[in-house]
Amino acid sequence: MSETTPTRLPRILSGIQPSGQLTIGNYLGALKQWVQLQSDYDCYYCIVDMHAITVPQDPNELREGTRRNAALYLACGIQLEHATIFVQSHVSAHAELGWILGCFTPMGWLNRMTQFKDKAAKQQAESVSAGLYTYPTLMAADILLYQANLVPVGDDQRQHLELTRDLAQRFNSQYGETFTIPEGFFPKAGARIMGLDNPLAKMSKSDPSEYHAVYMLDEPDRIRKKIMRAVTDSGSGIYFTDDPAKAGVNNLLTIYQAFTDETTEAIEARFAGKGYGDLKKAVAEVVVEGLRPIQQRYRELTADSGLIDEVLAQGAAKARLVANATLNAVRDRIGFLPALDRA
């Protein structure tokens, strides 16, 4: 009787940079979705520190942010029996495959990347790094190393995912089936949380404004203060809308819905006839209560100074097994001479 190889669950790869404090936008647009996905998929959740250094970083803050991200992944409910948490730079295959893919990427493809243009426009020309320009090929390596079937991405990363798919197809066509062609997973509610002080711009952990973002580790009173100062408009109606003039109200409603999972109809009925102050107070309370257990779990996890490093070491070991298998196949396909191991 012949043995059959067990069919693995579809694999997911996603990651967040460890620069800056994670916001409720990161939680609602990514981490909350990751927790929901982990039971049905083979999940690899990365802390992408190599991407973070495409712009200058303070070394101590980068290390602190890496551990903080890992602890928050766990505090949100990522379970190690269902998911692998690891640091990008702990798996050297990312850098090597990133270089190899860069050698197969036409410059014209990279020149079309709008996120590079947007980020480069905010810097002086002489300070824009080559790493920022080639960011998409490293992201492609991140995904393709793990033969990911699905990649949860926001609107700002769709173009990079398409580049990843194009690179995988190009390589497979030239060298034979090597990479899985990934599909995008585009979450709905809470996928795009906007800034409290500028509801026309996505909430960002790098924005310098004091009242732009609610951070996942903000104290309750700080959360309330920020939300009570959120930009709204001079009108009075409280309802979901795409009207830019009411973007602030729509953003608050989106946050409320993402934390409560209530329907649009139920939320609009709840706030019918009420003022913006009532809306802000309600949003602040659901955010405070939604973050409370996460913050408590975070404090418990970080009380043991060695726990997070051990989790990351185990995650990197598991990630290397998958990544190195892919990288070895790529090396063989392109004609690299295998290295002889010498003790």
Image (spheres, grey):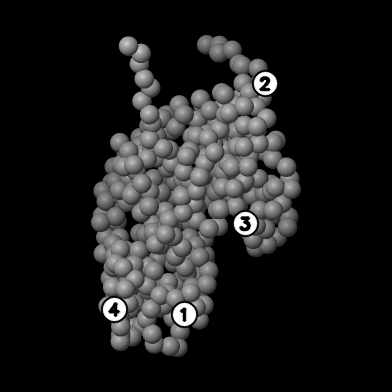
Give the distance between the C-alpha atoms of the residues marked 2 and 1, in whole angstroms: 58 Å
* Front-most of residues 126 and 73: 73
- Other residues around mark 3 within 10 Å, as few (<14) / some (14–19) / many (≥20): some
Q: Gap between marks 1 and 4, in whole Å?
A: 18 Å
Q: Are marks 2 and 4 in contact (CB under 8 Å)?
A: no
- Residue at 57 percent across and 43 percent down: it is 139
Three-letter amino acid code at the position of disc 2:
Gly
- Residue at left offset 50%, top offset 81%: 245
Q: Is residue 281 left or right of residue 153?
A: left
Residue hosting label 3: 115
User: Residue lying furthest front in this view?
Assistant: 1
Q: Which label number is shown at residue 335?
A: 2
| In contact (CB < 8 Å): disc 3 and disc 2 | no
Which of the marked residues, 4 or 3, is nearer the chain's N terminus?
3
Please name the amino acid that badge 4 sits on. Answer: Ala
Q: Secondary structure at mark 3?
A: helix
User: In the rendered image of this protein, does residue 209 appear above or below residue 80?
Assistant: below
Amino acid carrying label 1: it is Lys
Say which amino acid is labelled 3.
Answer: Gln
Q: Earlier in the sequence, mark 2 or mark 4?
A: 4
Nearer the camera: disc 2 or disc 4: 4
User: Mark on residue 269?
Assistant: 4
Examine the rendered structure and indicate whether residue 182 appears above or below residue 250: above
Q: Nearer the viewer, mark 1 or mark 4?
A: 4
Apparent side of residue 156 relative to residue 278 in the rendered image (left or right) = right
Give whichever of 62, 258 is nearer the camera.
258
Q: Is residue 220 visible?
A: no
What is the x, y in percent for residue 263?
31, 68
Q: Position of residue 117 (x, y in %)?
A: 67, 58
* Mark 1 lies on residue: 246
